Image: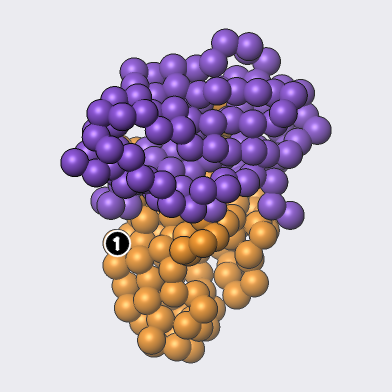
């Protein structure tokens, strides 16, 4: 979507390998988020960032780490991918206060085999 | 803890008819926003409508409207004159903590709506 891009769009990886997903925004928004979407669970927050180098855990953070060295980039890393991390991952951005909710990226479908 | 509940995992409606998707939530806040998002088969998440909790008037966006019952903590989405393109997963969302720096949304599990010709 305009202003936020995720890469890659699809990825297949093997169990035990590290994986990094990238989220890039051009809106200069302060807040960035990583969610995973699974059938029957909706969207669940993994990690979020409220500024450069300021991050915090969400409800399903185990097995994931994040980094934000620049306002525009928010990286999600699976240190050692497991089959339970097969999911669709969404990045989202917000200017704060959530008056207008989030703007979402187009998602990354990750398959761990 | 789950703070947003969508009790209808799946629904279907005939084209041109009206359908209502339900959502309930739990909060102790008084001033907040509520949102409905649509996810068509393309996977893109699209904001459909938002409601400000301190406004009594229900939000409307073309064929989409909400029935907001603040005391009951209910936020349902009504789709009028359903179209085939409305077939999608619909998510209700709201920020459980609107104060401080906790600017994050909690989502319901979703309702899969199918519009039949």
Residue A84 % position (x, y) = 51, 78
Residue situated furthest right in the rendering: B28
Residue situated furthest left in the rendering: B117
Disc 1: host chain: A
- The colour scheme used to paint the residues is by chain
- Which chain did the renderer colour purple? B
Residue A70 % position (x, y) = 50, 49
Residue at x 69% of width, y 31% of height: B73
Residue at x 29% of width, y 25% of height: B81
Which quadrant holds the N terminus of chain A?
A: top left
Residue at x 60% of width, y 23% of height: B68
Q: Nearer the viewer, residue B21 or A22?
A: B21
Can see residue A103?
no
Q: Nearer the viewer, residue A10 or A7?
A: A10
Residue at x 63% of width, y 66% of height: A61
Q: Is residue B2 left or right of residue A5?
A: right
Can see residue A112?
yes
* Residue A41 image-quadrant placement: bottom right
Residue A8 % position (x, y) = 31, 64
Which quadrant holds the C terminus of chain A?
A: bottom left
- Which chain did the renderer colour orange? A
Residue B106 % position (x, y) = 61, 46
Q: Is residue B27 left or right of residue A10?
A: right
The total of numbered circles placed on residues is 1
Q: Secondary structure at mark 1?
A: loop
Q: Is residue A16 depicted above or below A25 in this figure?
A: below
Q: Tell me the crowding category of disc 1: few under 14, some 14 to 19, or many 20 or more residues within 10 angstroms, Cα based.
A: some
Which residue is identified by label 1? A9
Q: Is residue B112 depicted above or below A59 in this figure?
A: above
């Amino acid at each position: 979507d305009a202003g936020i891009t995720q890469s890659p769009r699809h990825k297949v990886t093997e169990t035990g390998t590290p994986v990094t997903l990238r989220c890039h925004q051009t809106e200069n928004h302060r807040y960035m988020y990583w969610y995973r979407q699974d059938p029957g669970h909706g969207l669940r927050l993994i990690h979020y960032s409220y500024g450069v180098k300021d991050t915090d855990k969400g409800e399903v953070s185990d097995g994931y780490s994040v980094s934000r060295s620049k306002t525009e980039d928010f990286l999600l890393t699976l240190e050692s991918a497991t089959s339970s991390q097969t999911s669709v991952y969404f990045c989202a951005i917000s200017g704060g206060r959530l008056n207008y909710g989030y703007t979402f990226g187009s998602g990354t479908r990750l398959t761990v085999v | 803890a789950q703070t947003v509940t969508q009790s209808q995992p799946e629904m279907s409606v005939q084209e041109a008819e009206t359908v209502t998707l339900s959502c309930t939530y739990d909060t102790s806040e008084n001033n907040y926003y509520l949102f409905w998002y649509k996810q068509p088969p393309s996977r893109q998440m699209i904001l459909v409508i938002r409601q400000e909790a301190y406004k009594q008037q229900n939000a409307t966006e073309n064929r989409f409207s909400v029935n907001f019952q603040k005391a009951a903590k209910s936020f349902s989405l009504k789709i009028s004159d359903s179209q085939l393109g409305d077939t999608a997963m619909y998510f209700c969302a709201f920020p459980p903590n609107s104060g401080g720096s906790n600017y994050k949304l909690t989502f319901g599990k979703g309702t899969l709506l199918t519009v039949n010709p």
